[in-house]
């Protein structure tokens, strides 16, 4: 309850988080393991504000924390470092300030870390370089400074932090300087009759310096722009030649066409609805090969940040392995639709797990 107390929930999305309830596993957006421990908090895009309570560190069985696209402010609690089983931490697109806690380096099972689009400052903790299993680290568009540790993530973005010095190589930032583009030969001696006036030499030096700085600024700007564009497209390879059914490549997941899923649900017939929640409607689908699936048709996919959020969540869900979490088996993305495909569970629990 400490988490709810410090968050400001103006839209009552946490209204069933009841202090008198002995079973938090019944609370909305809370997932528990079979032995009754809280294993996931999924609160993305819920318009929450306030602060994240240090009490989150008491939920030591947490494997996933999704708090992206809210208005949470304050600092990141250092107690998150106690969550030794945590695999996914996404607090991107909030109003977080302060530094990144060194204790995050204690999260040895962490695979995904997204803190981009906040107002975090200070240097990156060296402890992040000790996490060996990182697949994605996104710290872009903050106010971070100093050198960058050698983080071993497969995908790493630090773009949009103007005071970052670059990958650490043993030198501190105070030693970084711009060298002249060229030097005159040592044996070149200017004779008195050929010597230029002092003011002329100063003008040339100033012009060369300004030109050098401008050149470096242009190169850095182009690099940041390229990395930002690359970061936005890193998860999906979309074939732009087919605007109605773009091909998306993402590992082992099956790529369904919209026509195929529409036919399987009988044109998303209301009689096929298994459940409905804040993020979409779940339909029962019958594929041509005879298999039965649950098709989740997402709402509001093209809200601010929706595309990036969809891409991130598909990758996170597809790699999540837990006996109490539904395994994502496929997806569909078109110009107008975003759909997720799960195995159908005839006992009805699929609907309850997909209603969020």
Image (spheres, rainbow, N blue to C red):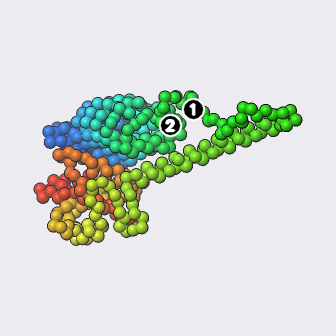
Toward the front, the furthest residue is: 187
Residue 354 vertical position relative to residue 210 in the rendered view, above or below: below
On the rendered structure, is 211 left or right of 346?
Answer: right
On the rendered structure, is 307 left or right of 210?
Answer: left
At 16% across and 39% down in the image, what residue appears?
Answer: 36
Residue 70 appearing in the image:
no
On the rendered structure, is 36 left or right of 46?
Answer: left
Q: Which mark is residue 289?
A: none
Instruction: Check disc 1: other Cα within 10 Å, few if <14, some if 14-19, many if 20+.
Output: few
At 41% across and 31% down in the image, what residue appears?
Answer: 125
Image spot of residue 47 (x, y percent): 37, 47
Image spot of residue 20 (x, y percent): 19, 37
Residue 151: quarter of image: top left
**SS for dot 2:** strand
Residue 236 appearing in the image:
yes
The residue where tag 1 is placed is 176
Toward the right, the furthest residue is: 193
Pick the front one: 72 or 131: 131
On the rendered structure, is 26 left or right of 92?
Answer: left
The residue where tag 2 is placed is 166
State if disc 2 and disc 1 touch (CB < 8 Å).
Answer: yes
Q: Which of the image's four quarters has the N terminus? A: top left
Residue 324 vertical position relative to residue 350 in the rendered view, above or below: above
At 52% across and 35% down in the image, what residue appears?
Answer: 165
Image spot of residue 327 (x, y percent): 22, 52
**SS for dot 1:** loop
Pick the front one: 182 or 38: 182
């Amino acid at each position: 309850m400490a988490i709810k107390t410090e968050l400001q929930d103006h839209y009552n999305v946490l209204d069933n988080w009841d202090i008198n309830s002995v079973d938090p596993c019944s609370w909305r957006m809370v997932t528990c393991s079979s032995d009754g421990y809280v294993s996931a908090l999924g609160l993305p895009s819920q318009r929450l504000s306030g602060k994240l309570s240090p009490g989150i560190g008491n939920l030591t069985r947490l494997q996933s924390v999704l708090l992206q696209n809210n208005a949470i402010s304050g600092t990141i609690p250092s107690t998150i470092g106690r969550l030794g089983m945590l695999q996914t931490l996404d607090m991107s697109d909030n109003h977080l300030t302060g530094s990144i806690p060194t204790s995050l380096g204690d999260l040895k099972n962490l695979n995904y870390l997204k803190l981009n689009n906040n107002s975090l400052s200070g240097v990156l903790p060296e402890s992040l370089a000790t996490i060996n299993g990182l697949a994605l680290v996104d710290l872009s568009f903050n106010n971070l400074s100093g050198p960058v540790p050698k983080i071993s993530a497969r995908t790493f973005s630090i773009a949009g932090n103007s005071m970052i010095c670059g990958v650490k190589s043993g030198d501190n930032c105070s030693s970084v300087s711009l060298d002249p583009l060229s030097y005159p030969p040592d044996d070149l001696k200017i004779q008195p009759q050929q010597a230029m006036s002092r003011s002329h030499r100063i003008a040339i030096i100033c012009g060369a310096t300004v030109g050098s700085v401008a050149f470096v600024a242009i190169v850095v700007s182009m690099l940041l722009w390229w990395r930002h564009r690359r970061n936005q497209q890193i998860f999906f390879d979309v074939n732009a030649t087919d605007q109605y059914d773009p091909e998306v490549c993402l590992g082992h997941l099956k790529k369904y066409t919209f026509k195929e899923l529409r036919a399987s649900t009988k044109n998303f017939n209301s009689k096929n609805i298994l459940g409905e929640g804040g993020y979409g409607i779940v339909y029962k689908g019958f594929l041509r090969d005879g298999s039965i699936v649950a098709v989740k048709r997402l709402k509001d996919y093209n809200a601010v940040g929706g595309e990036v959020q969809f891409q991130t969540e598909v990758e996170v869900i597809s790699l999540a392995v837990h006996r109490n979490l539904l395994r994502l088996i496929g997806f569909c993305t078109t110009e107008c639709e975003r759909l997720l495909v799960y195995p159908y569970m005839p006992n009805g629990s699929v609907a309850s797990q997909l209603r969020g």
